[in-house]
Image (spheres, rainbow, N blue to C red):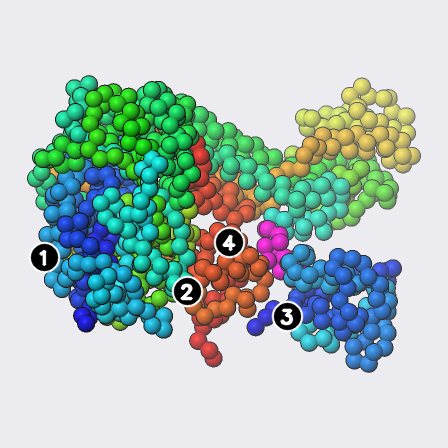
Amino acid sequence: MMARTIVAVATPPGVSGVAVIRISGPDAAEVFRRLAGKVPRPRAATLVTIIDPLDGTPLDQGLALWFPAPASFTGEDCAELQVHGGRAVVAAVLAAILTVDGLRPAEPGEFTRRAFESGKLDLAAIEGLGDLLHAETEAQRRQAFALYQGRLTDETDRLAQQLLPVLALVEATIDFPDEGDVTDAALAEARGQALTVRDRITGLLADAGRAERVRDGVVVAIAGLPNAGKSTLLNAIARRDVAIVSPVAGTTRDALEVQLDLGGLPVVLVDTAGIRETMDPVEAEGVRRARRRVSEADLVLWLAPTIESVTERPEGAWVIQSQADRGATPMEEARHRISASTGLGLSALLEDVRAFASTMLGGEPAVVVHERHRLIMIAAKVALDAALRHPDWPAAAELVAEDLRAALAALGRSRGRVGTEAMLDQLFSAFCIGK
Amino acid sequence: MTTYDVIVIGGGHAGCEAAAAAARLGARTALVTHRFETIGAMSCNPAIGGLGKGHLVREVDALDGLMGRVADAAGIQFRLLNRRKGPAVRGPRTQADRKLYAAAMQQALRAQAGLDIVIGEAASLGIQDGRLTSVTLADGRVLTTGAAVLTTGTFLRGVIHLGERQWSAGRIDDPASVSLSESLLSHGFALGRLKTGTPARLDGSTIDWASIERQEADSDPEPFSTMTKRITNPQITCGITRTTEKTHAIVRDNLARSAMYGGRIEGVGPRYCPSIEDKIVRFGDRDGHQIFLEPEGLDDDTIYPNGLSTSLPEDVQEAFLRSIPGLERVAIRRHGYAIDYDHVDPRELLPSLETRRVQGLFLAGQINGTTGYEEAAGQGLLAGLNAACRAGGGEAVTIGRHEGYIGVMVDDLTTRGVTEPYRMFTSRAEFRLTLRADNADQRLTPLGLEIGCIGTERSIRFRDKQQALAGLRERLEALTLTPNAAKAHGIALNQDGIRRSAFTLLSRPDVAWADLCRAWPELGSVPATVAEQVMIDAHYAVYLDRQAAEIESHRRDEDLAIPADLEFDSVPGLSNEIRAKLERQRPVTLGQASRMDGMTPAALTLIAVWARRAGRPAA
């Protein structure tokens, strides 16, 4: 039994200039023969008239692209048709394609799955591809594309490359103890190398929070005493439709979140309930939640219309003098003076928040992006910690080796595995051993 | 015309084990060899065992093979290597008296019921319809059989190189087998060419022993075989010296005259057993290389200088030897030489060591691209058992990577092939902490009992030991004490109030057997060997639990057989490259496929799906 050939429309439904139809599998060439009368030259755009194979009626004119296996996205024979993006055109062409024997509609993700099964994409690349399709901000796009391009697997490969000679050296102390090739100095150096790798992994894990922020947004809480103008500010920002992404109801009755794209950076603005001492149990609960939201936020904007309401602000919060159009005395502590109703100072505030997010999310995209990556790194770190806990490496060599192998196996899980042969190659290239 | 169930060709370490194993299973067996006197000959260094290799000897012994017992009878310097490291990587080794070794091996074969020794040269194999039918000797005799084990060592088109000279030979004084090589080629076997070498043999009376370091034997020699009660041979010492700058200069100046560096050898030599030429070329910056001076026997003062294998001409050998401290006036009894020879690509073999091309034809030893007596013995044993099974119509016997070093070796060979002579290392075994020299019998004797290759005496001893081990383990799990009570016996624990078993206590590095005996005096009567093994299990307990989980996952892959008729062409999604490799190598299980070069996780997933589908009975 051969795999069936699959077909799907790659562009979103609706009216558009062009719609792209993709076909992958052993009968892809047959589709071209039946609908276009020929198989076009590989990897060249060819203008064809698409006909209904049943009665020969022309359906549309479009571009045909032919990617014979294995040089295609899925690794199989792939055909692509670019037709006019009208609903009826797409429906007619699709129906015509499905009359060819062996064709069926693709299931969701089936093209990517075939690319994985033929070794065209590894797991990390597929995760990156998924993130890429869902990226809404520039920072998310950069992070997703880095993962797709192998940022994780390059890193784990590099770490494995650094650990392999350490393991080789430890193995040499076991299998070739007589030769005097493995000096104490070399072992100490190897231990240092393992420590370096462990520290690097610790750093990558610490940086995982940044990746989460890129995906979920930098959380900025708008806080302050009741009637400080928090909701007004949120609404004012939300009204600037260049910024807003999607307003969603918050997790509590008191919090409202707005996701913003500030110059390509994802930022979540959270309005908190007014924070004050209260006897009302319902309001008290709102206050409690607001405090928590504030404590979890990356940045707190503390709205204070007057000098009296500056009190109680959490440490590190930016004091924003709100309602600045009402003639209150400018405060020394205020980082910004704004008026949500006139728009005074809003641009400067948003630019300042963007700069904050940029500092927080800046630099190269993080390596550890998904939970799976985090688990791989934790497993490697646990194994390296165990290896480094043995005080006397020569005496516990077989246990150290076991721990190092476990670390390498964990790193290998991001892509393939580290075979014993690779270790022996390392060993032999570096030492004169045996008799 | 004479008929045998199994015919073994070759009387080296692989051939002896193969013949004895086949006969132990009740097969009427013939061992065909050129000369009776060369049976059990040690062609290279006079030693058995070592790191990784000692494990193999113990495993051969666990299946009631010969090498362990014979080495115990011939051993003259027992040393447990890596004594200061963990028990999983210790390697029993002994220097062996060449004459005693050959004599003990010949005696063991003579004593084996159902085994004939046939003196002659095997010239060709009779094969009909893909099945082995007979072996024809050079003198015209024809032996009919359905199963043969070929263990030709370095004899297949062997060529000896000594300086600028070269001649056809299988060993220094023995002719090569040329016709057998051609016989194999004519059946389409893929042959490769490998090289090995041996050092000069020295006259011990011309060595200045007083000026060099000595290495003593262990004071309590540990036998290889569980059947050996104690070592009775007197134990000798070896010498240790080093090459000098002058040695290196002599070798370097004469490299062009070395057979190897003169470009006259096509075979690939091992990286881990480099000739002195290799050492100078690759590691010329060292100021010296260690040389062991090993006596070849109790009444033989011939010395084997371990570490000086060479194919330089005679005059250069003499010159560089004399530049080494202690050897200034040394006389050479026989010069060193290199030999290159044909081997069969071991990917031609099934895990039973039967060839895929010819049913009933098994290969073992150097012909499969390995080096070393122990590697040969392990393969010989397995091939002999399987040849007997083939003759008797039984199921093939295989040993997994998780069961023994023999399994690791056979899987490495049949899955990955060889690019240089293959030698065992402990680092090749991914389940190293489980596969120890001390528990070889626990791992493999049950398999031997199941197939019937274990003698009565060993069976009884094994069952007794099993019971003692299980009983002690149970006792240690049942005996518990509180941290307070432990403190009273001098065992320091966290004072957390948790009762711990004696076994748990033993797994701590700071708790010794003697500490337990203070707490529970009745443990004092446990035999030392039994206590020792349970202690080792306790020492590795945490790691062994983890390894057990890995073994479980390994076994799942090994249990998924890939049907012999699965057409990889019909598996969609495989790259052409992987498909071609699969068609060529025909992995037998999913596990074997997973270890092939260039295999991807995605391809494995596909193979698994299709193997399951094909393996399912048709509805």
Residue B29 lies, in percent from the top left, at 18, 64
- Tag 1: amino acid: Ala
Labels 2 and 4 in the same subunit = yes
Labels 2 and 3 in the same subunit = no
Work out which quarter of the rendered image holds the C terminus of chain A and state it: top left
Please give the chain letter of the residue carrying mark 1.
Answer: B
Determine whether, in the image, residue A310 is placed left or right of residue B20: right
- Tag 2: amino acid: Ala
Q: Between disc 2 and disc 4, whose residue precedes?
A: 2
Q: Between disc 2 and disc 1, whose residue precedes?
A: 1
Q: Does residue A264 appear anywhere in the picture? A: yes
Labels 1 and 3 in the same subunit = no
Label drawn at residue B569: none
Please give the chain letter of the residue carrying mark 3.
Answer: A
Range of magenta residues:
A108-123
Say if B516 sits above or below B410 in the image.
above
Residue B609 lies, in percent from the top left, at 51, 65
Q: Between disc 1 and disc 4, whose residue precedes?
A: 1
Q: CA distance from mark 2 to mark 3?
A: 26 Å
Report the residue at 78% width, 57% height from top: A44
Labels 1 and 4 in the same subunit = yes
Crowding around mark 2 (Cα neighbors within 10 Å: few <14, some 14 to 19, many 20+) is some
Label drawn at residue B111: 1
Q: Does residue A289 appear anywhere in the picture? A: no
Q: Secondary structure at mark 4?
A: loop
Q: Secondary structure at mark 2?
A: loop
Residue at the spot of label 4? B599
Work out which quarter of the rendered image holds the N terminus of chain A and state it: bottom right
Report the residue at 41% width, 64% height from top: B561
Please give the chain letter of the residue carrying mark 2.
Answer: B
Determine whether, in the image, residue A333 is placed left or right of residue B270: right
Q: CA distance from mark 1 to mark 4?
A: 48 Å
